[in-house]
Image: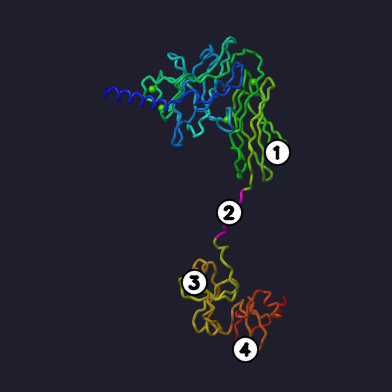
Amino acid sequence: MFKKIALVCFLFLALAVGSVSAAVISDFTVNDTATDFLYPTTWDNLVLDITVPNLKTDGTNDTLQAITFKNNGNARVSYEIAAVKVWADGGSAGWQGWGTDQLLGTATYDGNNSLWYLNNLAATVGTNGLRLFATIDTAVSINSRKTLQFYVPALVDNNDNGVFDLSDAGLYLASPHDGPTDGDLLSSNLQAVNTSTIDFLAPQIIINTPAAGVSLSSLPITISGETRDQGRGNITSVRLGIGTSEANLIWSTLSISSASYLAWQYGWTPLAEGIYYLKAEATDNSGNIGYSSITIVNYTKNVEPSTPPVEESMPILKDGTLIKGAAGSQIYVLSNGQKCWITSEAVFLGLGYHWDKIQTISETELNRYTAGADLIITYRHPAGTLIKYQTYPQVFLITADGQRRHILNETVFLGLGYHWDEIITIPDWESYPDGAEITS
Ligand SMILES: [Ca+2]
Ligand SMILES: [Ca+2]
Ligand SMILES: [Ca+2]
Ligand SMILES: [Ca+2]
């Protein structure tokens, strides 16, 4: 009796766990497919649009690993259904296809089980689920009596291992929430083949680079993309429109070689900084015109690095400044932008300099100054020295050619950026020829 109860409990528990794990039809969303008719030599025709749920309770992403498809209609493999591709939704919600949605791969047909499968996927199923699209390509030889109604068949996990193996069916996730366990995810739209021999389908064209929303600065900017005709035609013309608004595009015709599927490229040098709108156009040999979506980019001129060379970042010291290098003991006075070595303490003091006026600078900065004449006498001051005599108030500037030039007044003195403490007082007998008065 006890054993029976235990067994019943075990079975009940197993059923409960099973029902929690499985995904059922009502967990999925099946959206209507776009077109009723499918034409010869067309590609990326939408045949199924579903949203895979994330049933994990810990709030983490799930991963789609495998998906299978069957056709409820009678379209033939390799003819009406020349290829089956699987996409994850990208860009804005819903089907845009090439250049916007993300191609996950082309499914393989398994004739023994009459299904297409795409395995070894690692597509993220976010907490809001993953919207998936199935598309088909048609061949040129198709039969108008054929029909399509795609579906993801109900889960068949033959060996119960929770992963897809050949001859399994359904949709497999990294989690245990594989499904659907209670039936098929069937497109509500029965699609029929139309064997019209007239190509009335416009080419598709996409812009691959630059990516939308980027900021560009190096020139020229390469705008590139691809175009491919839908229907039976060839591309005969590709144009690129560039402008500061969508209503203000200036179109350039690109040179192409006629082909049904081709890459194109354009080197662009914007005339001014700003926001630009890019749009591409392709025309087929029946005159059908297709457009890309708009790509908006921002062009800014390349800004030169703002860090100046090291030398320019150093302050320019005035003539008459006393300097020494951080690592040395030699003292210099600047004269005509050169460093003049003051050869002894006697010369230093004899020229009227003061120890507390010496500025210590880096050896790098010291090396920036070329060497002028060594100072070995005390009765001549180097060029750039401000002097005044012991008994007279006038201030003079010693020039490069050894003259003294009177500085007119205090206003001129200060206006030239001098400071009173830069003046050296010299004995009355130290004589210099007079130069022109400095009046401004
Ligand atoms: Ca999309
Ligand atoms: Ca399996
Ligand atoms: Ca699984
Ligand atoms: Ca066409």
Q: CA distance from mark 1 to mark 3?
A: 61 Å
Which residue position is annotated with label 4?
A: 390
How dense is the environment of label 3, judged by Cα within 10 Å: few (below 14), some, or many (20 and up)? Answer: some
Q: Secondary structure at mark 2?
A: loop
**First-in-chain label (4 vs 2):** 2
Instruction: Looking at the picture, tell me which residue is in the foreground, 16 or 35.
Output: 16
Q: CA distance from mark 4 to mark 1?
A: 77 Å
Disc 2 residue type (three-letter)? Pro
Residue 440: quadrant of the picture: bottom right
- Is residue 362 shown left or right of residue 157? right
Residue type marked 4? Gln
Residue annotated with mark 2: 305
Callout in the foreground (1, 2): 1
- The residue carrying mark 1 is 245
Q: Residues within 10 Å of mark 4 (few under 14, many from 20)?
A: few
In space, the residues marked 4 and 3 are separated at their CA atoms by 32 Å
Mark 3, residue position: 325
Q: Earlier in the sequence, mark 4 or mark 3?
A: 3
Q: Which comes before the other along the chain, label 2 or label 3?
A: 2
For the residues labelled 4 and 2, the Cα–Cα distance comes to 52 Å
Q: Are marks 1 and 2 in contact (CB under 8 Å)?
A: no
- Residue 437: mark in rendering: none
- Residues tagged 1 and 3 counted as in contact (Cβ below 8 A): no
Chain-order first, disc 1 or disc 2: 1
Give the side of residue 303 with respect to residue 28, left or right. Answer: right
- Residue 105 percent across, percent down from the top left: 49, 26
Quadrant that contains the N terminus: top left
- Looking at the rendering, the stretch of residues picked out in magenta corresponds to 302-309
Q: Is residue 217 above or below residue 322?
A: above
Q: Is residue 304 magenta?
A: yes
Name the residue rendered at 43%, 15% in the picture.
113
